[in-house]
Amino acid sequence: MKSIEIKDLALSFGDVKVLEHLDLDIQDGEFLVLLGASGCGKSTLLNCIAGLLDITDGQIFIKGKNVTWKEPKDRGIGMVFQSYALYPQMSVEGNLTFGLKNAGVPKAEIAERVARASEILQIEPLLKRKPSALSGGQRQRVAIGRALVRDVDVFLFDEPLSNLDAKLRAELRVEIKRLHHKLNNTMIYVTHDQIEALTLADRIAIMRGGKVLQLDSPHTIYNHPATKYVAGFIGSPGMNFLEGTLTVGDKPVFDCNGQQIDTSRYQFDKSTNGANRPIHFGIRPEHVVAGRDAAEQPFNTEIEVEVVEPMGSDTLVWSQMAGHEFRFRMDGQSTVSPGEKMPIGFDPVTASLFDAETEIRL
């Protein structure tokens, strides 16, 4: 069952088109993440769903009802913002109950909803405190609780963790995942953090220029990106790209400044008719094997180490390959130094090939 349907949505501010002909279906109980760089339109889309912005064209349906021109309070949604937006003069309990009291919800039901939300979010000991006496993570839990007490079917999150430090972000990320498992409500989550997207989402919508470039599971988007932009945006560090030509003869071969890679085992999405087709060859740093095991890979070569970044559990190595910047990961216990020559290899079946002109996956 569809929880939210967005049909041919468009939004413009004067002559500036922010969203164009956008269609999106979100299933009941799904956790969808809108992911993209700043200015791609992800928060704007969320605000359109919430009713905080009047759209230029198109329609929005929530639970089968056309809510295109309904007020936010009548859409059956709960929203958690980037800023906590708590009332500083009220206690945590006051913040949780304020909206319910204004809506005329009976006292007994208010108490029941607050008790349920407090138990789920583990904020029962904080109910009598004011926001100034809370940590950042506790304030964000209260902000989530304020949406939770509304007892709605759809929750909207607008970069709720971006103001927190790395440790708190990781902790609350797990809490939000647990919350979704407990409630099984539809959740739409906006972020520019790919780790949040990959760990939280059932599906990810990668956005750019007001359009959705790819909508799929985290596994598919990571391993089978539809465009070069998506491939480069997902992954930390990003995918390595080599520019060269793909020659299709007896077998397809990628040539990059004389470095030839056999791509006959690569699963092409579309026909590659024509020789000397300019392409971008992408390979993720974690798919590269370095050291003695490199010789066992279908493709192998030798590089010179330029920069070493120890990261604890693994080590990131920066080098050059066929005139292009090339990064790969090694075990954190590996000893490697700048200037060292090292064999590396990989299986081209794990690569992603993109047309140089359209940047669409081949």
Image (spheres, helix red, strand yellow):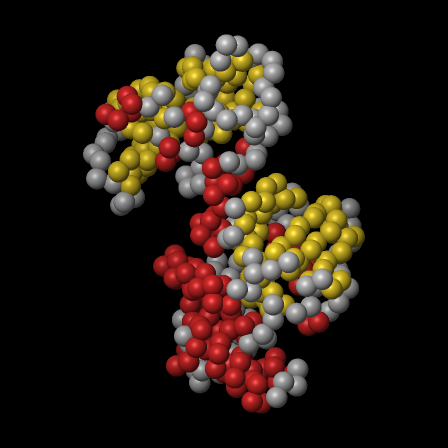
Q: Is 191 rendered above or below residue 149?
A: above
Q: Position of residue 80 (x, y in %)?
A: 56, 66
Quadrant, the N terminus: bottom right
Quadrant housing residue 178: bottom left
Q: Is residue 55 left or right of residue 27?
A: right
Q: Residue 347 appears at what percent x and percent y?
A: 38, 26
- Asked whether, in this view, residue 305 is left or right of residue 279, the answer is left
In the rendered image, the vertical position of residue 170 relative to residue 231, given as above or below: below
Where's residue 118, x and y in %? 46, 78
- Classify the position of the C terminus by image quarter: top right
- Foreground residue, 37 or 249? 249
| Residue drawn where x is 54% and y is 50% of the image | 203
Is 336 drawn above or below residue 134 in the view shown?
above
- The residue shown at (52%, 64%) is 184
Residue shown at the point (69%, 55%) measured from the top left: 5
Image spot of residue 287 (x, y percent): 37, 32
Instruction: Give above or below for 16 relative to 303.
Output: below
The residue lying at 70 percent from left, 48 percent from top is 23
Dividing the picture into quarters, in which one does residue 215 lie?
Answer: top right
Residue 214 shows up from this direction:
yes
Outermost residue, top direction? Answer: 250
Q: Nearer the viewer, residue 165 or 183?
A: 183
